[in-house]
Image (cartoon, helix red, strand yellow):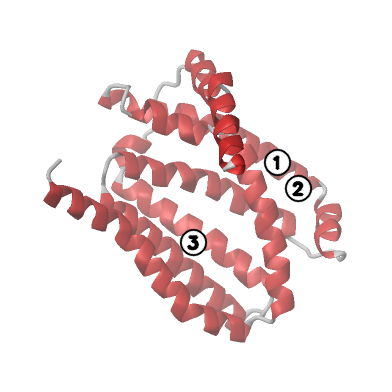
Amino acid sequence: MTIKAYIKSFFSFSIGTWLRAIISFITTPIISYLIVPEEFGKASMFSLVYNISLLVSTIGLDRSFVRFYNEVETEKRQSLFWECLLIPLLISLLISVVFISFERKFSIALYESYYTFVGGLFSLSLITGVFQRFNELSIRMQKRGLAFSTIQIISSVSNVAITILYAKVVASNFYAIIMGQVGGNAAALLYGFLIDKENRRISKIEISYFKKYISYEFDTDRIYNFLDSNSLRKVR
């Protein structure tokens, strides 16, 4: 890759990050004005559980997707997409069923009060989040920088627009932030599926490959090297 091509690729992938930062800088005061700090705290608790659940759901198969993407033939990459996505999707569905079934306990544990539909919103957020994680990775691995940045911008704009609209029209509470998150994930996911239909078609899934993808993430040598490198950093 030439220097010119490298710089062009760098900017095509980074423009989304910069524009998201600008959007956040402009809209944060507006959202802060509409929603009181206490409601932001509730949304932060929701996001904490969401992020942990997303990490558990993917179980590192997003990294396996990246690892094996360039090793499989082009026509088999859509199979790789669904093979790496299937287990995270099933785990997210299982987690969602648990949170919906115990919605009241979940809400009281987080907020010391029962808020309706929290379990359902959490489920929508988690499932769309899992899809969106692999959606972004697929576009990124194809080296489609502008498309990748567009997905980030659509997610950010949709998130902000839905949050503000909900706060103005329905209620100025933490539901507005959650709805924004769900809407942002859904909008970005829809765009990704529309521009990359070929790689989103459900194809034959080889169950025998699951062990290879999972074993890569839980390879003992990789875990040892990771822990060892972290130990060295602490010593330094």
Q: Position of 73 compared to 168: left or right?
A: left
Q: Name the residue under label 2.
A: 99
Residues at marks 1 and 3, CA–CA distance in whole angstroms: 21 Å
Q: Which amino acid does label 1 sit on?
A: Ile
Q: Can residue 194 be seen here?
A: yes
Q: In the image, residue 122 lies at what x, y percent?
A: 67, 54
Rendering coords of residue 220 (x, y %)? 58, 20
Circle 1 SS class: helix
Q: In which quarter of the image is the C terminus?
A: top right
Of the 4 image quadrants, the one containing the N terminus is top left
Q: Which residue is drawn at 40% across and 42% down?
A: 137
Spot occupied by residue 150 in the image (x, y as percentages of width and height)? 32, 59
CB within 8 Å, label 2 to label 1:
yes
Task: Answer whether residue 89 is visible to the viewer in this image.
Answer: no
What numbered label is drawn on residue 95? 1
Residue at label 3?
184
Q: Identify residue type, mark 2.
A: Phe
Tell me which residue sits at (78%, 63%) in the image.
Answer: 116
Horizontal side of residue 131 vs 224, given as left or right: left
The single residue placed furthest to the top in the displayed view is 208
Marks 2 and 1, Cα distance to the nearest angstrom? 6 Å
Q: Is 180 rendered above or below residue 125?
A: below
For badge 3, the amino acid type reads Gly
